[in-house]
Image: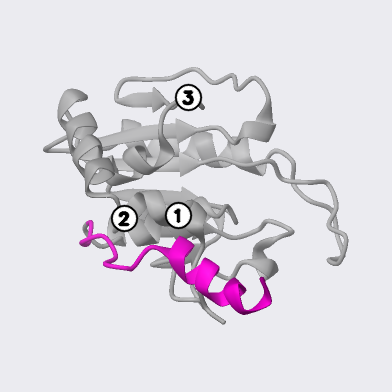
Amino acid sequence: VDTGNPAFDGLLDPAVRERGAALRKARGWNDRRVWLWASQVESESHPCQPGLGDTLLPMRIAKELQRVAHARPDMELVIRPHPSEGEYRIELGPRQWLSPRSENLHELLQACDGVVVLTSTVGLEAGMAGCAVVQVTGSLYTPDAPYLAYGIADAAVPLQGLEAAIDAAPARRPAADLAPAAPRVLEALSPGL
């Protein structure tokens, strides 16, 4: 049974879309390309995959995105730490923003043009919101979340291909026009209740 995820229903709310547009305007992003890095922890090991994880990969992605943004005067970069990353320390340059955990993620996605992820479910949400999605490969968890193969990502590239993938990414698309998942979940569960 395909119901969707009720946690993503907020993306479908017109008020969330309006607040995202207001956020974009308030930050002066209307004539800019806004990219979000949805950071995450990279484990040293995976319970089902061989090899060692690159625990520094998320920070190396952030640094590469900062370099890319610095070289593009029309680009804004938003860095969104994962809740499990603890205190996030990074020096921000011009046109670079740190999104606090208190900031509504769905509103932020509505304000962005593109999102970079490793394997975060933010990639799914970004696609629903109409953002271009670039997945950086090289995580131990990449085989568990092949977003390009699933049709979620516009590109899946190693870190050294990130700049070209951002340059080639499509413009923001209209947000997905989906029915909320919560009623479908309840309907699917109702025969057993």
Is residue 90 shown above or below 154? above
Is residue 63 shown above or below 130? above
* The residue stretch that appears in magenta: 172-193
**Which residue is at the far left?**
31
Q: Is residue 32 left or right of residue 189?
A: left
Looking at the rendered structure, the secondary structure element under dot 3 is loop
Picture coordinates of residue 127 (x, y %)?
38, 61
Task: Kindly identify which numbered label has been placed on residue 102.
Answer: 3
User: Pointer 1: what residue?
Assistant: 8
Picture coordinates of residue 145 (x, y %)?
62, 66
Q: Which is nearer the N-term, disc 3 or disc 2?
A: 2
Picture coordinates of residue 73 (x, y %)?
21, 33
Q: Is residue 90 visible?
A: yes
Image quadrant assignment for residue 40: top right
> Tag 2: residue type?
Leu
User: Pointer 2: what residue?
Assistant: 12
Looking at the rendered structure, the secondary structure element under dot 2 is helix
Looking at the rendered structure, the secondary structure element under dot 1 is helix
Q: Which is nearer the N-term, disc 3 or disc 1?
A: 1
- Mark 2: give few (<14), some (14-19) or many (20+) Cα within 10 Å: some
- Mark 3: give few (<14), some (14-19) or many (20+) Cα within 10 Å: few
Which quadrant would the C terminus be assigned to in this image?
A: bottom right
Q: Nearer the viewer, residue 135 or 192?
A: 192
Find out whether residue 86 is within the magenta segment.
Answer: no
> Tag 1: residue type?
Phe
Q: Are marks 1 and 2 in contact (CB under 8 Å)?
A: yes
Q: Nearer the viewer, residue 72 or 148?
A: 148
Seen at 51% across and 62% down, the residue is 5
> Tag 3: residue type?
Ser
Q: Are marks 3 and 1 in contact (CB under 8 Å)?
A: no
Q: Is residue 45 left or right of residue 94?
A: right
Seen at 59% across and 36% down, the residue is 82
